[in-house]
Image (cartoon, grey):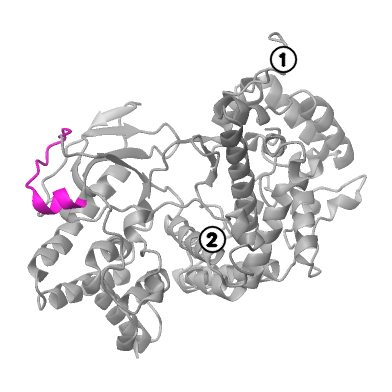
Amino acid sequence: FASEIPEHLFYTALPQLLSRVMHKNVETSKNVARILRTVLAKYPLQSMWSCGWLRFSKSEEKKKAGDEIFHGAHKMLGKIKRGKQIQDMLYASTSLFQFFISLAQFIPKINHSAVKMKVPIFDTELKNFIPPIQAALSLSPGALERSATTDVFPSFVPRMRAFNPELKIMQSKAKPKKVSIFAVPSTVAQRDTLPIDGRSIAQDVGEMHFLVKQEAKGDLRKDSRVQDLNNVINRIFASRKGSSGPNSRRRRLRLQLRTFSVVCLAEDCGILEWVPNTESLRSVITETYNPLMCPNSVHRHGSRITDFSDAELRNTFMKCQDVYFKRGGGNLDLATRKFDELILNQYLPVMYWWFIQNFSSPHSWFEARTNFTLSTAVWSAVGHIIGLGDRHSENILVDTSSGECVHVDFDCIFDKGLLLPRPEVIPFRLTPNMLDAFGPTGADGMYTGALTESMRTLRNNRDTLLSVLEPFLNDPVINFKGKSQKSKQDKDAKDAQTAMDSIAKIEGRLDGEYNLINPNKEKVKNKDAPSTADSTHFTKLSVEGQVQKMIMEATSHENLVQVYVGWMPWI
């Protein structure tokens, strides 16, 4: 049966197949390995990036399975024309993966912002590899509708020529590294003999940038799988299924998620495609000012709002929280009033002006603000469905050339944010500056319309989305805090049960439930017990009702005053 299905269709299901490599049914496991070998032999340049992490897994069983899959594909390639060159590339991919892993694990002894790296000589030239970018690893538009298995990937993607020896060290806690690789057109790479040293040459068309990182406690397979889900959602948004033709509201709104490639090198190491022309939400607000305020006004500059080193700002917010959290407190109504009076009324939003200051023509200004509003709405819908947390102002980026919103860092999914010391009790980030950016209507205009259409589309395609989430059940990667298990079997069983519970919660949201439970209600004895304290609604709501509930909870000052101070809910 599997032999009758075109290989490029199996390629789109690689995440699901890889999650079943260690299936407990031996026959199923063999069939999965056979399909993976076939896909790897058919599309080795692209598939090696998805399958390669198996050979460097922390699990000896997965490592053995990965070696067998690559060895089997290697033998199959020996039977075809030009197979020897591809065999050499697959063989050399081992040393390329090892090099990237060494970069991810590298810790500079001194806090340098950049270091010179020594690039090894690989067994085959770098130009023979397809770069791990989304444009190269995604099927061409329309390929899924064709039965032909050739020319299903774009041919215009540049090839890698040589590493830039300068390795930039990011200053965040995990110390990720920015790697730059000189790129040449694919026609030049196939035709010419090119130098492999770290200097720019005339044939270069620029540089490709990647972020290599190692997660101390997380698992980068989560990021990869969330991107797989996002790509499926983009295909759903772009399809005609469920729409009333080319003039349907969904197609007019141009709904989509900005995605990027995430390639796992092992469970804890990976390569992330660099997202160009972006700044964090916090940086955007920092550089903005309100020209209607007089030059000496404290409300003029956004940098005052985003200055986390301001002890007075931090302490004032935490004092507002203490009214609710400290022993003898529990007064959420008073904490909210203080939050409004001492924080929100004193640190006014300015992001409306960022679009005016960065997009000078009326058309570009309107397009940028529309892009921001629509992309924020789509991310709000998807983020709530999968329980995406840790949405602080550094994990939300803004494309400075288009205004589009881009989310990064998907470690905190399946409502894991509710387990933080200060639980993230909101469905998504919709803070004052974001509302300010939407314009005079705030959340009531285009944002609500786009969020409603996004939720309707997701709910209408629930079966497709749940099937994409199956790898989380078959190969759980979410580590929740809890009591340590006595054995690996106990841990695996608990992880599997947790994943099943999380998928069940997602099913509920796709059926119209608002099932985000605020854990603070059990921890804190609320004196005033306002009606908004019980924010859980398990009744199945209409799309419009669910959207209104989500927006109400996301913008609720009662909820915002409860989140961690570093989340900076006032911006």
Q: Nearer the viewer, residue 554 or 413?
A: 554
Magenta segment, prevailing SS (helix, strand or loop) = loop
Helix, strand or loop for disc 1: loop
The span picked out in magenta is: 186-201
Q: Give the amino acid at mark 2.
A: Ser
Q: Which residue is at a point 65% across and 51% down the rendered structure image?
A: 377
Quarter-of-image position of residue 511: bottom right
Residue 346 locus on image (x, y percent): 77, 23
Q: Residue furthest bottom?
A: 1
Give the Cα separation between the discs numbered 2 and 1.
50 Å
The answer to whether 357 appears left or right of 571 in the picture is left
Q: Nearer the viewer, residue 76 or 233?
A: 233
Task: Tell me, for residue 484, which label it has, or none.
Answer: 2
Residue 529 locus on image (x, y percent): 91, 49
Helix, strand or loop for disc 2: loop
Q: Give the amino acid at mark 1.
A: Val
Task: Tell me, for residue 181, which label it has, or none.
Answer: none
**Residue 391 visible within the image:** no
Q: Is residue 509 above or below residue 439?
A: below
The answer to whether 514 appears left or right of 168 in the picture is right
Q: Is residue 348 above or below residue 462?
A: above
Disc tally is 2
- Residue 76 inside the magenta-drawn segment: no
Q: Which residue is the site of mark 1?
A: 298
